[in-house]
Amino acid sequence: MSSKASQEDVPQFGRRLLPTVIDERARKEPDKPVAYLQRSESLADGFWPVTFRLFANAVNRAAWWMKERVQIPEANGAVAYLGPFDIRYFIFIYAANKLGVQLFLPSPRNSSEAMEQLFAASKTRQLLIPGGETGKPYRHLVRGLEKSLETIEVEDLRYWLDSVPVLHYPYDKPYDVGKLDTHVISHTSGSTGIPKLIKVPNGQMCTIDAKHHLPEIPGHEWLLTRWKTATRFFTTFPPFHMGGVLSLPIHSIYGDIPTVFGPPGALSNVKLLTEAITYSEADCAGLLPTLVEEMSKSPEALKCLANLKYVSTGSGALSQEIGDFVNKHVVQLYNTVGSSECGLIESCVPPREDWQWIYWPKEYKMNGMVMRETGEPGTYEQVFIRHERYSLLQGCFHVFPDKQEFCTSDLYEKHPTKEDMWRPKGRADAVLVFSTGEKMNASAVEEIVRKHPKVSGVLVVGQGKFQPGILVELIEDLDLGSSDMNQLRNEIWELVQQANTMSPSHGQILQDFILMLDPSQRFSRTDKRSIKRQHTSELYQREIDALYSNAMTGSKEWLVNLSTFSESEVQASLRSYFLEKFDVESIDDHANLLNLGMDSLLVTALARRIYVGETSSIRITPQVIYSNPTIDSLARALKNMTLDSELEHGEQFSKVVSMAKDYYNKNKARLHAPESLSRLPKRRTNLHVLLTGSTGNLGRYLLQSLLKDERVATIPSIEEAKKSETLARSFPNKKVSSVSISPGAPDLGLTEESRRSLRDCDVIVHNGWLVNFNTPLQGFESLLDGMVSLVNFALSCPRQPRFCFVSTIGAVAGWEDTTQPVPEKPLEPWHYARGGYGTSKLVASKMLEFTTDKFGLDCDVYRVGQIAGPTTEEGQWNTTEWLPIIMKSSRYIQAVPENLGSMNVVDWVHVDDCAKVVAELALRESSQPGTHYFNISNPQICGWEDLLPAVQSAYKEVEVVSLPDWVQRVTALHDIDRNPALKLLDIFQGLDKQPRVYLETKETRAHSTVLDSMDRIQAEDMARFIRQWNF
């Protein structure tokens, strides 16, 4: 054979278009099966092979048939096909490819409204549909669209698979031309609203073929390679969904495993599905997670699964409890991921016990995937970065050729102990955003409650509301009496309580917020049988509104009636309420309820149950309770409000200053040093740096900066228990150790052994603090208690460690001489601090000044200005802060403010640079004992107007308007999820009235080369922030 001929025979993997491959295999391997179909109505008759010869002939027959009957659509127009789950979908897909016609595959599960919008958006004028009784349910879906949509009846399956040869329909487009043509038009699942169209080009399908280029990685096996060990693949992925569109090319056209198509009704009938798999002689299967769960409840189905080599699942969340059982005792499970935009995302085979986890070895970087932090602890979004070198493997950039990166909205978490393993954590669009701005990923809660055998589906609701509620779909035909139903309610409440233990306080579901639907009421579902979240919410909007209305107003009697109760009666009612909620036998009327466990949900629930009278204009807000967090003070404040004796603003401010001084005086009296202590010399190397707050936004980067310094030997990190676990997963480094503490407990709750091991420290960096600007000063009491314990600990350390405290510009935000910057020194006035957050930091700073004066402890206080996003592509500026909120609302209202008033001067510091500055200062050579103040703010400034071009470039539709006009536009639109600036309206309305506070940085720059050489924020930085937010 000539070398030329040999070269032509070498497959050009990744550049082979599907119609070409089908025709080629029909010539070279005509009798090789590409699929198996049932022989007759009786599954016991077995399945017959569809060979490549027969399949290619069917595609040619369909191409000639379509050419005669189908009008070539207008530019970007489409022809649609709707039919039962069978191989005709693939015959029409490849026939349309040969004709150059865009074939649109709408889901039969779409609503009539969705169908109409999708046909209009895709410019579909003709619909192919089966004739006779088979096509009846599909014709029903397009009822009312006859004027805009011509229907063409297609013959049954026997016609297309007739073995009589037809003339070959040629297709000879080269890859570089054909890759741009549309393979199919698909659409999103519609789980969060009307589905959106996705044009999938041929080039994306070719990325399946390009996976032949996957490199061998020693010690690892690609899942695609493992799949090749089977001989027949039984699919349940619908061919009108991309998971189904991909299945035949993956296994049978680019691969060598025939795909088995079962009867159309198998997806909704476990008995039929079990029989189909059994009689098909398939030795592997692709099963939707809901089918795995349903089959796990049938002994016959489990016996069927046990005969398979493996089951591939994906396109949804499979209950861990069920999955663990099936994987361990029945058949090996493989979890796969992919999407309409990306196609199949390749991964390696994980250890069997880690079936839920997706294994992406760090040695493999050919698809440009990165995991980007979302701002929610332990949660990462999958993002793809364009690399031209690997374009054959990057499916998403065939779909979006103009993008440089693609954010999938798919969320993952890291394996706690094993590198390069990631578990799907739901979708970003499954994240609820409450009216408070706090977020909750509903997936984990829904999975726990769905475990109940009488529960078919679970949906957490509450978008834009203060707290979550839950809808429970019961299994069909459930017949329960009233006593049984009450028992079921109690059992479901137990599961909700179990879920609550793993949720943050703002994401906990109260018993009043559980709605069990009637067994006849069903959720709206996608083709993958996952819940259509938005459509289901809309379907039961009246029930949801009633749920919240009853829970928040009339379902309980008033706890306190301010119009008739005396102060002592108010006090007694409050005492009874908190005894019940805290489940204690006694409570001190002067105890701080915030320290006893009063969270935002409890505060809001209490505020709703205080009656002020029919005609009263008094409004009991959560802030009233936060500002008076003892039973005694709250009872007095509530009665004072009814007497119109609310304090004026100036008096309230004086009250806060007085409270701050009280905290200071109380806590400084608790500071003490050991009477005798053997001192050890200070070290310059082999340093032990004790760190708090290492899991927060700044803390993560601070830990990285300390790790890179060769002088640092160990970094013990003391954190609350939950954060301590997060740290262990995020930083598996020998230098880092994690110690759990209780901030408000005596000695931080440290054991004597832990105290001994930590005392040999050289530097303490205290960065751990509650970052919540709505919390009053009282809410920081436990942190101030923890500060006392930490300072006393420092005084007991033999090496006299430097104590470094990360403070805030909020501690001096009331600086009065705005013609001068805030100096780098202690400031005497207490009234400079603003808000509970800033005031708590001021109290802590003054405690350090006292400690230095009395005990000689070397202390640093770092007043940190505005922290911006990182300098790198990974990570992001926390989306709950003021600038991201402005940007998200600006995108929504299509207007951006031309100036930001007092925030117009941009002296922001990148978060990773800020961490480097703190590390430099903390590790500097020994200084004179004292309390040293350092101000961390960018010495190189620019104006908001310098960054506006980047905003306009990213959001081309936005208009630049004045700040008052922008505020007015924000006020006019009430969707708090898409317009989060509503939550900070008071702040934004006052931006042009507030004076600007600047920080002097001369002394800080003298000790920090990073700050001294820092560049101003550039337009390209702003562009990166916007990309990372991905609003």
Image (tube, helix red, strand yellow):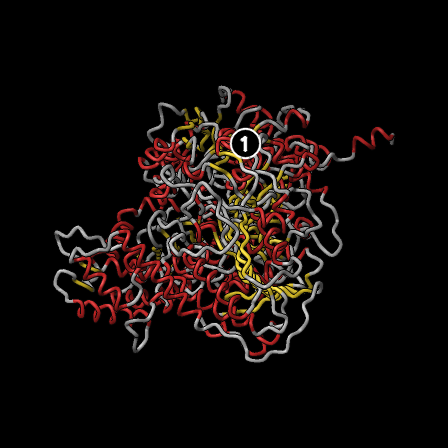
Q: Is residue 421 above or below residue 483?
A: above
Residue closest to the eye, 545 or 24: 545
Residue 1019 lies, in percent from the top left, at 55, 33
Q: How many marks?
A: 1
Label 1: state its secondary structure.
Answer: helix
The percent coordinates of residue 355 (x first, y second) are 59, 59
* Residue pointed to by mark 1: 92
The answer to whether one can see residue 281 in this image is no
Hey, what amino acid is under mark 1? Answer: Phe
Q: Residue at 51% of width from left, 52% of height from top?
A: 863
In the rendered image, residue 1018, in percent from the top left (x then y), is placed at 57, 35
* Rendered residue at 61%/55% (across/down): 921
Quadrant of image for the N terminus: top right
Q: Residue 893 lies in what quarter of the image? A: top left
Q: Residue 810: in sight, yes or no?
A: yes
843 is higher (above) or lower (below) than 314: below
The extreme right residue here reads 2
Nearer to me, 887 or 683: 683
Q: Nearer the viewer, residue 779 or 880?
A: 779
